[in-house]
Each structure stands twice: as C-alpha cells, then as structure tokens.
Amino acid sequence: MSSQHHDPANVTNPEHAEHRIVQPGTYIAVYVTLLIFTGVTVAAAFIDLHIFNPIIAVAIACIKAVIVILFFMHVIFQTKLIKLTVAAGFFTFLILIFMTLTDYMSRAWGLW
Amino acid sequence: MDNTIVATHHDTHAEEHHHISLPQHRHHFETEEQQREAGSFGMWLFLLTEIMFFGGLFFAYLLYRNWYNPAFVAGSNQLSIPLGTVNTAVLITSGFFMALGVWAAEVRKKGLLVLFLLLTILTGLVFLGVKYVEYSEKFEKHHVPGASFDISEFVNPPVNPKTGKLTEEPLSPDMAQKTQIFFSLYFAMTGMHALHMIIGIVLLCWLTWRAQRGDFSSGYVAPIENFGLYWHFVDIVWIFLFPLLYLINRHPGA
C-alpha cells in the first residue's frame, strides 16, 4: 500500500488484499510434490485395479491441477473475487459435463 | 473507518499526478492493488474460456473411450510411457521456472528474471522436441488417421519374443478401425496443447526481450504474472492429457 492518506475508495474496501510475494521455497515444495505425484500416477497405472485405474489416474491429475492452481497460479493468496471466479468457472464446466453425460447415458441405457 | 464515505481528494492531487505514468498504476485505477486484481480477473476469465475449449475435447474423449474401449486401450498402448513421463516432468519443470520468474520480477531482479524466462523457453522447446519424436513415429507406423492409416498391428498384434504371447489383444477389423478415433483425439488434443505452447514460447521470447530492457524490474510485473497464469494453464491441460492418453490400460498380467 503506497500511502495511507491517498486511496479514497479502497482503504475502506477490505477486498483489495495486501499483495503477497510467493517465495521460492514454496515453489520448490510444490515442484517436488508435482514430480512425486507424476511418479505415483505412472506406478499406479501398472497395478491392475480394474475400474479404479482410471479413477485413480483422474483423481491424481485433479490433485496435481489443484496444487498448480492454488500455488503456482497464486489463487490461494488472491482475493475472494478471483477465488470465486475460478471456482465458478470449474463449477460451470462440471455442470456442462454432467448434464451432457446424463443425456448420452440415458439414451443408450444399459448399453454402456 | 469502515463503511465511511471518504470524500477528501483535496490534499492528494500532487501525488496522483506523479503516479500517473507508472505502468503498474494507470490513472484510471485507484490503487496498484486494484489494477493488479482487475488484471488477474481478466486473465482468469480468458482462461475459463480456454477450459471450456479444452473441456469439449476432453468430453469427446470421455464418450468415445467408453464406446470403443478396446480400440482406445490398443491405441494407448502404442504411446511411449517413458517419453510421456519425461515430458510431464519437463513441463512441470518449465512451470516451476515460470513461477520462479514471477518471483524474480516481484523482487525486481532483472538478471534472474531473464534467466528464468530463458529456462522456461528452453524446457518448453525440449517438450516440443520430444513431441516431435513421438509424432514422427506415428507417421512412420501409419498411425495417423486418414487414407493411409494401417490397422494391421491392431488386427494381428506382434508376438512378444520373451513370453511367446501376443503383445496385444487382437481386435476385430471393425474395432481396429476405431483406433483412428483414438489417434484423432490424440493428435487433436496434444496438437492443440502443442499449439498453445508454441504461442506461449513466442510470447515468452517477446517478454524476455522486454525483461532484458528492464520493463519488469521496477514494480510492473503484471505481464509476467498473467503470462505465468497462461503457462500454468497449459501445464494443467497436460497434467490431464498424460494419464488419459498414455496410461489407459497397461495390462500388467500380459
């Protein structure tokens, strides 16, 4: 915050959070975590778990994506506006997938 | 102080005028934080359209994988897990350097920023190089969808010399044709991803040139930060592509 006396509109608005610089240590921890999960997902692919193989693969991918979004993309340090925007986007995407799937699955009921 | 209407501009004009030319605080924003947030907000809205765009491809993949699962299994087994894994690690490394680049811009270290941007470019090019090797193998084996597509390897899979068994479940000619759908999606999805990387690398070269000029070493980090969001988004797409395309079914029993 450059000055206390300036800023007629935003000092009273708590939404404009103090900017935070993410330190390299955080990035290194995230990087190592992502590499470990990459190894885990490859290893899990070689174990026969039947229908759980794709579920685990997608679950690990989701975990990795969330880690990237929260830390590499700084969403965890952002204001509520940005958090809500990101969440709303993914939520809308899931609705699209879900609604379309209900259509496809009910048309070929029992054949999939 | 909360909720009070502050209507005093009188003693701030002088300061406002010397702020006016800063790129991180243009005159139509009240504060630097407001400008930064508006920029991030806009960038995220763009990325959400990108999510919908790739989401359509992922949905097509989901449906066809369920309909023609044997063809998708056989097609997936044609992809190289070592190359895919290495490329995943390369791309995560690229994202890591990009994140460090944002940090270097924030703490105003010009040399480090240029270095990290160059490393991001380099790892991005390595990724595309590996992709080129993978693509050319598909062309050699006639596994590119189209008139010259060759289903023979899926109808008559080769025998593994060690075990004496077939390396793959043989598919009926009908189902073997459906591997073209797998490879169509493979090329569409990885190709779109690669196109995003090529665009990203072009932008990175421009940003590196500007960083070298000193544009981002005096508190103005928005272009670096927002490009970082784009680059990490491309990472995320690959994080999903890799398991879905490469790791469908590795039949450990065979």
Image (tube, grey):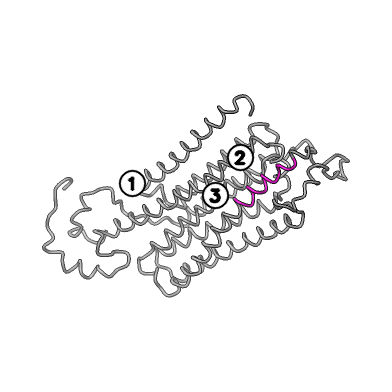
In the rendered structure, are the residues bearing label 1 and label 3 in contact, judged by CB atoms less than 8 Å apart? Answer: no
What label sits on residue A57 in the rendered view?
2
Q: Nearer the viewer, residue A53 or A33?
A: A53
Q: Quick check: is B181 in the magenta stretch?
A: yes
Residue ID for mark 3:
B237
Amino acid tagged 1: Leu
- Give the residues in magenta: B176-188
B151 is higher (above) or lower (below) than B95: above
**Could you give the CA–CA distance between mark 1 and mark 2, rounded to whole angstroms?**
31 Å
Amino acid tagged 2: Ala
Q: Nearer the viewer, residue A4 or B149?
A: B149
| x and y percentages locating residue B119 in the rendered image | 55, 65
Q: Quick check: is B232 in the magenta stretch?
A: no
3 or 2: mark nearer the eye: 3
Between discs 1 and 2, the one toward the N terminus: 2
- Residue at the extreme front of the image, as rendered: B147
Chain bearing tag 3 is B
- For label 1, the SS is helix
B22 is higher (above) or lower (below) than B189: below
What label sits on residue A81 in the rendered view?
1
**Could you give the CA–CA distance between mark 1 and mark 3, rounded to whole angstroms?**
24 Å
- Most frequent secondary structure within the magenta stretch: helix
In the rendered structure, are the residues bearing label 3 and label 2 in contact, judged by CB atoms less than 8 Å apart? Answer: no
| Residue at 41%, 47% in the rendered image | A76
Image quadrant containing the C terminus of chain B? top right
**Could you give the CA–CA distance between mark 3 and mark 2, rounded to whole angstroms?**
14 Å
